[in-house]
Image (cartoon, rainbow, N blue to C red):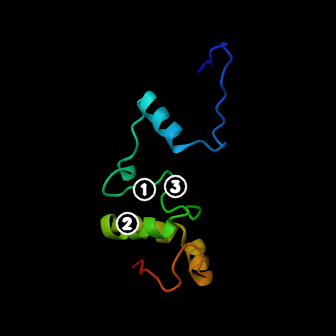
Amino acid sequence: MFDSNNVIKRFKPLNPVSDDWVEWYIESRKIYLCRLYYEPFNFKRTGCKGCPFALDLQEQLEVMARLLPSERKQCEYIWKPVYDEYRRIGYRLHKEEQIKLF
């Protein structure tokens, strides 16, 4: 991308950008996103499925429990040590919630 003086505008992926800019970029580049970002899932762009860094982790797991139960079980299996600790301290996941894997 160039500005009016033909100077390159730099995009640094780790710098914060607005939601409007992200939507513009997706549309202008004709990027097709995973269906999980749309109805009925409405996930935000967090990276890995069930990522412990997701601020809305509890909500993501609840949606998966309703609509994608096998995906939810995979997350519980993959992230078990982290989820267990989060639940123990009440961080990002409800303390009382436990899921049976088998």
Q: Secondary structure at mark 1?
A: loop
Q: In this image, 10 relative to 23: left or right? A: right
Residue at 40% x, 70% y: name it: 62
Residue at 34% x, 68% y: name it: 69
Tell which of 45 and 65 is nearer to you: 45
Total marks shown come to 3
In whole angstroms, how far apart are the C-alphas of marks 3 and 1? Answer: 11 Å
Do tag 3 and tag 1 residues touch (Cβ < 8 Å)?
no
Do tag 1 and tag 2 residues touch (Cβ < 8 Å)?
yes
Mark 3 crowdedness (10 Å alpha carbons): few <14, some 14-19, many ≥20:
few
Q: Quadrant of residue 74?
A: bottom left
Q: In this image, 11 relative to 93: left or right? A: right
Q: Earlier in the sequence, mark 3 or mark 1?
A: 1
Quadrant for the N terminus, please: top right
Residue position marked by numbered label 2 in the rendering? 63
Residue position marked by numbered label 3 in the rendering? 48
Q: In this image, 63 relative to 82: left or right? A: left
Amino acid at the residue labelled 2: Val
Mark 2 crowdedness (10 Å alpha carbons): few <14, some 14-19, many ≥20:
some
Mark 1 crowdedness (10 Å alpha carbons): few <14, some 14-19, many ≥20:
some
- Whole-percent x and y of residue 42? 38, 55
Residue at 61% x, 18% y: name it: 2
Amino acid at the residue labelled 3: Cys
Residue position marked by numbered label 1 in the rendering? 43
Residue at 31% x, 57% y: name it: 40
